[in-house]
């Protein structure tokens, strides 16, 4: 069977969006069903993909590679261990997000669904592109629907938030575009032919200064997206103003694009620059972990609390990336998924509260646990997953991150472990104020517990949390081959460079692979 | 000789048109100045075509003429519209694009 | 699959069913289910224990079973694997045995509560997590149980979550534990980098082979002990335990006395090769333990809440266990853990019975003269007090004595003397409690009096069983001087816990010590009698004479306030200031400033746009001229 599976997964949502155009906007039900159907179809296909994915293969699979615009611009899709679960996560969350919008979005429902589907295509495309130009196209394509989602469906300060969000990320991606052209030109000069293929480009050994500048250009784009301290201030604003679904996808998937960019592009393409910048990156990541934690501690709005917790959690992911060894990378990838699930669920849950009470201020709540026991239990599960309780998903990723970071640099790890305390402090502090204590106001007194549709959103996420927490092996084994190859490649590329510092092309990079062994012990 | 004369004439025309466009304050006159400039360009094309003995430039002249005709139609319509809204076609009054 | 693998199975299934359907099931079903799962676990534990005895005869003392590879990446690997050995056997028997009794007791104690299902679900989950903790084969898997019991503790302390104090106490417990857990996690990581493994078996080999550098061993041992100090409420992380008394009393008995809080002791005993390898770490453990024993004892002297007295007493007794482990007498430490589980849960449950009888009254100042009202609770309470006070030939006496003997035998005079001093305190505050609650005037209001009733059989029978166990448990570990059947307990543990190096304490010295500790108990009880029975005006007079000290002890040395003032408040306030001044004031302002600057620049550049078409034409002309000029010249 040679169906272009990856293209199908990527563009099914977009096809759904096109279909939606022809449905009149008054027919909410049909719009909703059509949108869900396409998103579910994409998810089902991604499951097929996951089943057929071969975990022993380190390189990309299901590759589709066709010339497109010339000058090395190919339509080149492929999936490997690094992108597999990010694609799955996106395809998994998208139907849930649409499901959640059924009641939360009252006006312009059709547009909302449209933008969501376009967004899904953009996000999946980013993770599947193996051509830098294509990557850039999807990268930007994911930005535009988000702009509208926040700008149209957001809260009071939505225009401010969405402008800030777009300008911030645009500033980064503009530099990335320049970087892409520089890479294209350099490659053409070295090899005599054009290519923007990520794997081709990673065979270039660039001079130190070129690497530095390029890494800074790409790094800024990724760092803003992650977001790395001090580029994080767009995040709380965007989250607070965004509608529930957009918040979920923003936190669960869009932020991962930054970390993914570092893993896929930043580190393999510029191994020597990374060597110089990794400590700086790590310092920023550590600051982000601690800083985000403390900021979350003093937030008054549940959403901005979760947003700052994302800064903290993504700091850990980035620190693990900076440590760059098999363990830490495995941890980083797993932790990205975990963060997507737990934070996504927290945003869903905040959405549930907001839909019922039209407030998100922590002080407006209290005693919700008595009124909504089922919801409280599910919320607690998300909180526990987020703070890394063993048995739930957060821990499996966290311990691998810690171990990998520890192997690379003990001091970083010691500082990173503070997140264990901070996460408990801000999350349980919030939980205490929202769910515990006596019922003090009428809004809370009038709450009713969640029903079937909301359970349908939460239950799959919770099950997945337990699955990853209890049997992370099923997930780790599919990514191990790719990750250990990546880890080893960059290491050996550094060694390669040390011998001579002259721009050139190295032949195929095939380091001796000892599957499963990290390098630092 | 004739080529030089023709091109010279076209330059004179063009400069006149330009000056008229800049100096005049009423849209309709400016519009006519633009027409003069266009035709100056046409003249240059023709003169040079004659001098070089090639047909390309003559072809272009046809293009310019069609475009000029279209431009005249659209332009006049715009001017009319402006007049209807503003009751004036003095360019001083048309400063809505001021930064 | 070996039988011990099934021990945690029933509780987790019970917890699962109760969490999912607990709100719909009738109470009878809930309690039957909850108790039967623990009973099943107990039966499995006994079976596994018997099985272990038989395999031990053939020299196989340590059984392991790997369920599956849990987390594995690169060189990091943690299995979901169980290890059943004498130490684990003791622990599972305590956990399921005492757990069963407390489950049964809870059926009566909690019978009028609204969220009956939730209570038993948490209790079952707790038992499961605790079993996981003691059965785990490696540190990472142990951490699952470690955090799991912390979670259940959080849930159960905050069982009455509508009560702000209970909700706060739960949160505090979790947070303080998390501080310890951060240390624990770092300890695991340091050990892993040093030894390349986290399994107890390989760690023991690594330590024995001196693979681990001594400094690293010390560091990781101390870090792990921070975790233990959090879980087992030692200085400086004990502050959560007194507040944890906000939870239902059976919970205090099970989690905050008998099992969870002893997890730290268990962990140290489990890693005894490491702590023996690093004398410095052992010394720190002994020191902290001894200090805590006395320190918590002094606070317990003046507490008026019956459960808080017991809470501080628990902290103090845990200190003894650490003292024992720290000086290298791991078996003695675990022995005290074993006996303590019985007598302290007995005391808590009996206190629960008293509270139950007095319609929820916990203040000793409003009790008194209860002896005649509670004919079944009083004797067991008295037994518990006698045992903990260290009256000779009861279990508490033997286990405490074993610890002190080891301390002195190793020349640890300082901690030994602290231990003796703690013994006096223990006897005093326990009998203060007895005298205040059961003797003297009836100080409760008439309305309460009309409701006083002895607890139902479902509550008093477990008490009787525990009382019996508290008395006899000591005979499993008789001191060496009492004949050749001595030290059964430590001999049983020998395969895992290296025997205390034979103390060079002479027989005479040991006898002296036994007499001394008996004397300590006597002095404590006598003083309590003097203060609270003979001359009841004395306490008031002392309090008036030393008001500062009295207040200082009453408020627990103001440690909560101090932590609040020097740690919590500065951090929260600092974070708030940073958020306002730096995050919003500098970073965000810089971002907005950039945006605004672009706007101003645009405005300035916009001045060029006059809107007059002539100006544009002129500009075009100039542009053309310049362009042509450049092109031509």
Image (spheres, rainbow, N blue to C red):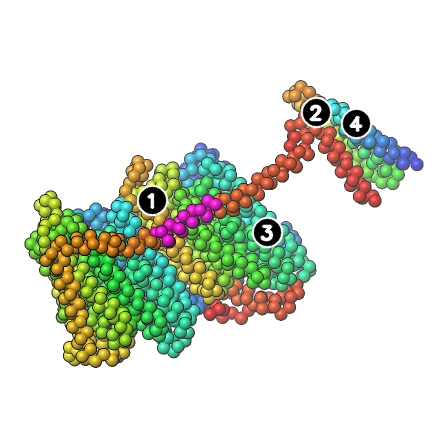
Residue A52 image point, x, y percent: 46, 59
* C-alpha gap between disc 4 and disc 1: 75 Å
Residue marked by disc 1:
A434
- Asked if badge 1 and badge 2 are on a common chain, one would say no
Chain at tag 3? A
* C-alpha gap between disc 3 and disc 4: 48 Å
Q: Is residue C150 magenta?
A: no
Q: Considering only vertical position in the picture, is A450 above or below A269? A: above
Residue marked by disc 3:
A176
Chain at tag 1? A
Q: Which residues are magenta?
A: C564-581
Which mark, by number, is residue C418?
none
Residue C267 image point, x, y percent: 30, 67
Residue marked by disc 2:
B92
Q: Around disc 4, counting alpha carbons within 10 Å, would you say few (fewer than 14), some (14 to 19), or many (20 or more)?
A: some
* C-alpha gap between disc 2 and disc 4: 16 Å
Instruction: Pick out the residue farthest to the left.
Output: C372
The residue that appears at 46% across and 66% down in the rendered structure is A407
Q: Quadrant of residue C523?
A: bottom left
* C-alpha gap between disc 2 and disc 3: 45 Å
- Asked if badge 3 and badge 4 are on a common chain, one would say no
Q: Is residue C577 magenta?
A: yes
Q: Secondary structure at mark 1?
A: helix
Q: Around disc 3, counting alpha carbons within 10 Å, would you say few (fewer than 14), some (14 to 19), or many (20 or more)?
A: many
Q: Closer to the N terminus: mark 1 or mark 3?
A: 3
* C-alpha gap between disc 1 and disc 3: 42 Å
Q: Is residue C202 left or right of residue C58?
A: right
Q: Quadrant of residue C371?
A: bottom left
Residue closest to the eye, A430 or C139: A430
Q: Secondary structure at mark 3?
A: helix
């Amino acid at each position: 069977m040679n169906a272009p599976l990856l293209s199908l997964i990527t563009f099914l949502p977009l096809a759904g969006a096109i279909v939606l155009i022809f449905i009149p906007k008054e027919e909410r039900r049909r719009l909703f069903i059509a949108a869900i159907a396409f998103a579910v179809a994409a998810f089902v296909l991604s499951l097929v993909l996951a089943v057929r994915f071969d975990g022993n293969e380190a390189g990309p699979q299901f590759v589709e590679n066709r010339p497109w615009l010339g000058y090395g611009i190919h339509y080149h899709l492929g999936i490997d261990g690094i992108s597999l679960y990010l694609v799955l996560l996106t395809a998994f969350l998208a139907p849930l997000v649409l499901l959640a919008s059924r009641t939360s979005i009252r006006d312009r429902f059709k547009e909302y669904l449209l933008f969501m589907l376009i967004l899904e295509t953009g996000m999946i495309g980013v993770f599947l592109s193996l051509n830098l130009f294509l990557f850039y196209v999807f990268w930007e394509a994911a930005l535009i629907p988000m702009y509208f989602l926040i700008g149209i469906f957001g809260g009071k300060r939505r225009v401010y938030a969405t402008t800030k969000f777009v300008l911030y990320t645009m500033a980064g991606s503009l530099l990335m575009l320049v970087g892409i052209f520089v890479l294209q030109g350099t490659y053409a000069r070295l090899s005599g032919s054009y290519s923007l293929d990520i794997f081709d480009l990673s065979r270039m050994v660039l001079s130190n200064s070129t690497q530095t500048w390029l890494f800074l250009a790409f790094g800024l784009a990724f760092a803003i997206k992650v977001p790395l301290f001090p580029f994080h201030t767009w995040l709380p604003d965007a989250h607070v103003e965004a509608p529930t679904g957009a918040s979920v996808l923003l936190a669960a998937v869009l932020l991962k694009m930054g970390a993914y960019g570092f893993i896929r592009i930043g580190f393999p393409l510029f191994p020597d620059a990374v060597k110089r910048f990794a400590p700086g990156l790590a310092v920023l990541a550590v600051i982000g972990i601690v800083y985000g934690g403390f900021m979350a501690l003093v937030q008054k709005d549940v959403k901005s609390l979760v947003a700052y917790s994302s800064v903290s959690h993504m700091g850990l992911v980035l620190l693990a990336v900076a440590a760059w060894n098999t363990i830490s990378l495995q941890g980083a990838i797993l932790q990205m998924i975990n963060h997507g699930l737990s934070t996504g669920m927290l945003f869903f849950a905040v959405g549930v509260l907001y839909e019922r009470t039209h407030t998100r201020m922590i002080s407006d709540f209290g005693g919700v646990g008595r009124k909504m026991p089922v919801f409280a239990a599910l919320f607690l599960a998300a909180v526990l997953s987020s703070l890394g309780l063993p048995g739930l998903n957060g821990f499996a990723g966290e311990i691998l991150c810690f171990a990998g970071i520890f192997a690379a640099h003990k001091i970083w790890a010691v500082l990173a472990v503070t997140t264990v305390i901070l996460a408990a402090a801000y999350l349980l502090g919030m939980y205490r104020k929202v769910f515990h204590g006596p019922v003090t106001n009428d809004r809370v007194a009038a709450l009713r517990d969640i029903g079937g549709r909301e359970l349908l959103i939460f239950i799959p996420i919770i099950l997945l949390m337990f699955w990853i927490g209890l049997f992370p092996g099923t997930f780790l084994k599919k990514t191990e081959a790719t990750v250990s190859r990546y880890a080893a490649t960059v290491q050996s590329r550094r060694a390669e460079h040390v011998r001579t510092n002259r721009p050139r092309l190295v032949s195929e990079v095939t380091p001796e692979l000892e599957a499963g062994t990290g390098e630092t012990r | 000789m004739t080529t030089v004369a023709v091109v010279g004439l076209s330059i004179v025309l063009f400069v006149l048109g330009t000056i008229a466009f800049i100096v005049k304050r009423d849209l309709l006159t400016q519009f006519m100045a633009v027409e003069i400039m266009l035709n100056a360009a046409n003249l240059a094309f023709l003169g040079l075509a004659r001098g070089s003995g090639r047909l390309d430039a003559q072809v272009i002249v046809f293009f310019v003429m069609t475009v000029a005709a279209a431009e005249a139609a659209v332009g006049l319509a715009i001017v009319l519209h402006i007049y209807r809204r503003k009751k004036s076609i003095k360019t001083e009054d048309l400063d809505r694009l001021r930064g | 699959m070996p039988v011990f693998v099934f021990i945690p199975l029933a509780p987790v299934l019970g917890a699962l069913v109760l969490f999912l359907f607990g709100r719909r099931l009738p109470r009878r079903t809930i309690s039957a289910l909850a108790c039967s799962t623990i009973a099943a676990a107990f039966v499995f534990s006994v079976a596994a224990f018997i099985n272990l005895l038989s395999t031990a005869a053939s020299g196989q003392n340590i059984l392991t079973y790997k369920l599956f590879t849990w987390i594995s990446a690169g060189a990091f690997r943690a299995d979901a694997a169980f290890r059943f050995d004498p130490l684990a056997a003791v622990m599972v028997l305590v956990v399921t045995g005492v757990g069963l009794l407390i489950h049964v007791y809870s059926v009566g104690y909690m019978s009028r509560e609204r969220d009956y299902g939730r209570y038993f679900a948490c209790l079952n989950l707790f038992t499961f997590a605790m079993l996981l903790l003691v059965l785990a084969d490696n540190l990472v898997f142990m951490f699952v149980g470690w955090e799991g019991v912390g979670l259940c503790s959080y849930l159960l302390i905050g069982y009455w979550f509508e009560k702000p104090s209970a909700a706060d106490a739960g949160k505090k417990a979790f947070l303080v534990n998390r501080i310890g857990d951060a240390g624990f996690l770092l300890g695991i990581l340091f050990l892993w980098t040093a030894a390349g493994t986290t399994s107890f078996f390989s760690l023991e080999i690594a330590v024995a082979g001196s693979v681990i550098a001594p400094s690293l061993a010390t560091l990781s041992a101390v870090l792990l002990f921070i975790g233990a100090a959090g879980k087992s409420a030692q200085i400086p992380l004990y502050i959560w335990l007194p507040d944890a008394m906000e939870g239902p009393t059976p919970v205090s008995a099970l989690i905050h006395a008998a099992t969870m809080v002893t997890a730290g002791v268990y962990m140290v005993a489990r890693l005894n090769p490491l702590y023996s390898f690093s004398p410095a770490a052992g010394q720190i453990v002994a020191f902290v333990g001894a200090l805590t024993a006395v320190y918590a004892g002094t606070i317990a002297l003046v507490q008026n809440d019956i459960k808080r007295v017991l809470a501080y007493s628990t902290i103090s007794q845990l200190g003894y266990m650490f003292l024992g482990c720290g000086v290298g007498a791991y078996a003695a430490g675990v022995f005290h853990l074993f006996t303590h589980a019985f007598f302290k849960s007995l005391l808590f449950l009996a206190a629960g019975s008293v509270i139950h009888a007095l319609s929820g009254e916990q203040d000793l100042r409003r009790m008194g003269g209860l002896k005649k009202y509670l004919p079944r609770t009083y004797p067991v309470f008295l037994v518990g007090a006698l045992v903990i006070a260290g009256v000779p030939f009861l279990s508490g006496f033997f286990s405490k004595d074993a610890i002190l003997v080891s301390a002195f035998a190793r020349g640890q005079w300082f901690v030994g003397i602290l231990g003796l001093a703690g013994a006096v305190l223990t006897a005093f505050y326990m009998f203060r409690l007895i005298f205040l609650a059961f003797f003297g005037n009836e100080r409760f209001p008439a309305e309460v009096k009309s409701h006083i009733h002895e607890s139902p059989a479902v509550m008093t029978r477990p008490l009787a069983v525990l009382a019996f166990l508290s008395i006899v448990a000591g005979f499993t570990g008789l001191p060496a001087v009492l004949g050749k059947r001595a030290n059964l307990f430590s001999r049983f543990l020998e395969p895992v816990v290296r025997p205390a190096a034979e103390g060079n304490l002479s027989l005479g010295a040991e006898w002296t010590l036994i007499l001394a500790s008996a004397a300590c108990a006597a002095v404590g009880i006598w003083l309590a009698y003097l203060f609270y029975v003979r001359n009841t005006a004395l306490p008031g007079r002392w309090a008036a004479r030393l008001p500062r000290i009295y207040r200082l002890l009453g408020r627990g040395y103001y440690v909560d306030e101090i932590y609040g003032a020097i740690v919590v408040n500065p951090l929260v306030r600092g974070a708030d200031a940073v958020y306002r001044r730096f995050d919003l004031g500098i970073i965000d302002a810089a971002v907005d400033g950039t945006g605004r600057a672009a706007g101003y620049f645009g405005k300035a550049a916009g001045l060029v746009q006059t809107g007059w078409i002539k100006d544009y034409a002129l500009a075009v002309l100039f542009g053309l001229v310049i362009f042509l000029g450049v092109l031509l010249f």
